[in-house]
Amino acid sequence: MARKNRTFTTFSLSFLDIMSCGFGAVVLVFMIIDHSIKEDVLNSNQVSQLEVDLLKSSIEKENERSKTLDSKTLELNSEIMHLEKSIESLKSDLSALDTLNAQPVKKVPNQQDLASLNQQIIQIEASLNTLESKSRALQDESPLNFTGSGGRQRLSGCKLMGSHVAIVMDISASMLETTVPDVYALQNEIDGVQLKAPKWRSAVKSLQWILGSFSTQTKYQAYIFNDEIKAIKDNTEDTWLEAKNQPELEVVASNIETIIPHGGTNLQNAMLSLQKLDPVPDSIWIITDGLPNQKGNSDRYEKVSVSDRYKYFLAAQKDMPDLASLNVILLPFEGDVKASYLFWKLAVEKGGCFIAPERNWGRSKY
């Protein structure tokens, strides 16, 4: 059977299919190309931002470095100027020295010249004594007076502050001498020899110096401690004494002259006793020669290590009245190397002062 002739149409179904597929492919390619461009641009922007941040950080570091260099340059310039001034001063001193060397040597002073100088010294000392007397009158002079010249100035450098002053004085055996063998040797001597031991005399004079520095308005209490603690004036524990009471003050100052050091050192018990005073002291003075060798609840001497003594010191420090200033007079004792630093540090923290008396303090009679 013969086929019928088909008419040709430009927009047949097959043609439209082909055109649709082609257009879809073009759109797909366009979308893919556009997306990749956006991703590249975004990545490029991120990289550029990182580079900008790095550059900013580098600039800030360079600026800081520049400021540091400028500061160091100023410091160096200041040091250079200081050195130049020092050099000029040295040159001036050398020039003056050359001038003096060029001058003829003066004659050796004779006895008349020396007598004249001595007279001038005496007049100056008299003026100083007058000024000191006026100063003491203005500052409400202590009721306890020591005879002699200059005795009360040997421990100067600490101002005796506080309205209620407590003194705790170490009377352990080590207060006799500066080495262990010497302590043992001196303990075998008679009482009179022990009482005159140079180190003990320094401790006694230190206590008397404090007592002599009180104003008449001061209230005080003075304790001695070794294995135990007691008031220097009998039957006055836990009570305040008045410095204006001259006879009582003299009793305290003289009683210490009869004490012979013995036993160990229990500083914690001494601090606990101060808490029984009412009101508690606002100023504390400790006269000792090293770290304690007994703990608070012990009543007998025990051989202890360096670390043990440090622990006992910390325990005593913990029991010290909180608001009181602390002043320490530390006498020498061989081998106790940490004592100076620890007592000095504690005195500074407590707003007081630290004194190491000169070796001849108290050895001569004033």
Image (spheres, rainbow, N blue to C red):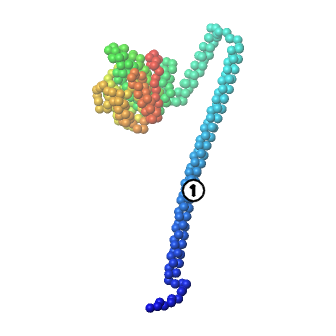
Up-down: is 337 above or below 36? above
Where, by quadrant of the figure, is residue 101 drawn? Answer: top right
Give how far across and how far down residue 61 sits, in percent: 57, 46
The one nearer the camera, 285 or 186, is 186
The one nearer the camera, 81 or 100, is 81
Residue most extreme to the front: 1
Residue 287 seen anywhere in this rendered image of the structure: no
Numbered label tally: 1
Give how far across and how far down residue 356 sits, in percent: 45, 24
The one nearer the camera, 144 or 48, is 48
Where, by quadrant of the figure, is residue 183 drawn? Answer: top left
In the displayed structure, does residue 68 sit left or right of residue 197? right
Q: Quadrant of the N terminus?
A: bottom left
Give how far across and how far down residue 312 sits, in percent: 34, 31
Crowdedness near tag 1: few (<14), some (14–19) or many (≥20) residues, C-alpha within 10 Å: few
Residue picked out by circle 1? 48
Q: Residue at x 55, y 24 (%)?
A: 132
The one nearer the camera, 350 or 150, is 350
In the displayed structure, does residue 349 sit left or right of residue 52? left
Q: Residue at x 53, y 66 (%)?
A: 35
Q: Secondary structure at mark 1?
A: helix
Residue flagged by tag 1: what amino acid is it?
Ser
Up-down: is 41 above or below 199? below
